[in-house]
Image (spheres, rainbow, N blue to C red):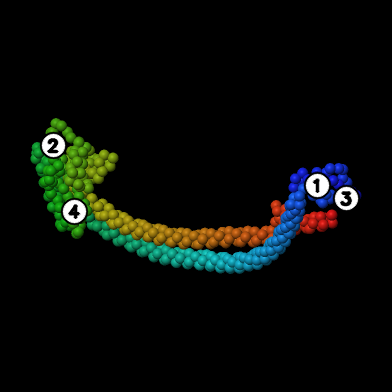
Amino acid sequence: MKTVKVSIIDENTLSLLEDAQKGDTISLKDLHERDIDKSSISDVVKNKIKTDVEQELKKLKEQLDAEKQKDLEVAVLQKEKELKEQMEVTAKEEHKKHENELTDLKVQLEKLSIENNTLKEQTKKDVELATKNIESKYQKDITDKEYAIKKLEDEKQTIEENTKNKMLLEFTEKENNYKTELSNKDKEIGLLKDMRLKQSTKMLGETLEKHCDLAFEQIRLALPETVQFGKDTDAKEGSLGDRIYREFDNEGNEILSIMFEMKNEADETKTKHKNEDFLKELDKDRNQKKCEYAVLVSLLEKDNDMYDGIYTVPPTKFKDMFIVRPQDFTKIIMWLRGVNTKIASTRTELAVVRNYNVDVANFEAKFEEVRDKFGKHYNSAIDKHNSAVDEIDKIIKELTKMRDFLTGSDRQLKLALNDLDDLTVKKLAKNSPSILALATGTEQNTKKKKSSH
């Protein structure tokens, strides 16, 4: 080992003046005496001391920072432990709370289900009771109506039998009268034939009308006082019939009306007329005067035996129209009265049947009304029942949805707990090398290595 000679370049730099090896020394005294003054050396020493102090301060600062970092990590670990414990307590409390809520919801759902079943049973009983009451009421009404119908049918049969017997007696009596009148009319016919050969057409017509008037007077006492018979004097429509017969009931209602037309013709008349020639005009007069029947009293076609009795004009030509000889004038009146009586009886029966039908229709209408009301009330009850069921279904869906939320919350809490279990300082300090080194002891090992050198 030797003392190496150096020279000072400046206060920070020395220059070797000869080769040197490890362990050689530099004499600062020789260096001072040769190259620099004491103040320079002092400055160098001061700089050296300053540098050493700064390095030591840096080390102390780094040590202090390391200790602070270690305290910080301990605080972080303590905070993490406290946070983890708090989260576990909170999670358990929330879980218990959700379990209690879920239990309450299940109890409520069970209660709603019981109420729903009770409501269904009560609605079913109410509907069955209402149905039985209505069926019982309708059955009673039907029984009453059937009894009333049977009673009406019995009364109808009694009336028919009484009317039939009465009419039979009347017809027998009238038939005897007709036979007597027929004998008289035969005598009148002979007289009329003699008179017809001696009189003009006009005179014959007037005589025929007079004959009918006299014949009517002979049966006048046998007719009701409400019967009217006489000339047609209403010429408002432009034409007149010969005679009009009208009969009324005690209430003043017209029950029979006949328009009569009288036609005669002498044998020596050149132009011969037929009965059919006057039917159209007779029908017109009958319609204008609102008569139900029309009768042509005729001496035309005297050789045609078809008109010797009561001849009915075919309905295809004219309805309710007849042709008779003068001797059958009163006979047609009595015959039409009998027919009209029978028709009146039939009309009465029809009125009874019509009233019965009206009763049945009213009953059916009332039945339909009650059935419609029952249907509306039943449908309303069903709608309310269905609405209640829908509301219960909605509540069930909401409870199911809430249960799913609670289940999901519970699952998330479990995941949070798992995350706490997996939480370590290494994972937290992954992007912080100094904390990671402190945690793993890397820095302590480095210091030991330095101190050993």
Residue 151 percent across, percent down from the top left:
36, 64
Q: Is residue 448 left or right of residue 200?
A: right
Callout 2 amino acid:
Ala
Q: Nearer the viewer, residue 315 or 41?
A: 41
Residue 77 vertical position relative to residue 11 in the rendered view, above or below: below
Residue 223 percent across, percent down from the top left:
17, 56
According to the picture, the residue beneath numbered tag 2 turns out to be 266
Would you call the spot at circle 1 few (<14 residues within 10 Å), some (14-19), or many (20 or more)?
few
Residue 23 is tagged as: 3
Callout 3 amino acid:
Gly
Q: Secondary structure at mark 4?
A: strand
Q: Quick one: which residue is furthest to the right in this view?
A: 1
Labels 3, 1: front one: 1
Quick one: label 4 or label 1, which is nearer the N terminus?
1
Labels 2, 3: front one: 3
According to the picture, the residue beneath numbered tag 4 turns out to be 247
Q: Secondary structure at mark 1?
A: helix
Q: CA distance from mark 2 to mark 1?
A: 204 Å
Q: CA distance from mark 4 to mark 1?
A: 184 Å
Q: CA distance from mark 2 to mark 3?
A: 196 Å
According to the picture, the residue beneath numbered tag 1 turns out to be 34
Q: Nearer the viewer, residue 125 or 118?
A: 118
Image point (79%, 58%), residue name: 444
Would you call the spot at circle 4 few (<14 residues within 10 Å), some (14-19), or many (20 or more)?
some
Is mark 3 in CB contact (under 8 Å) with mark 4? no
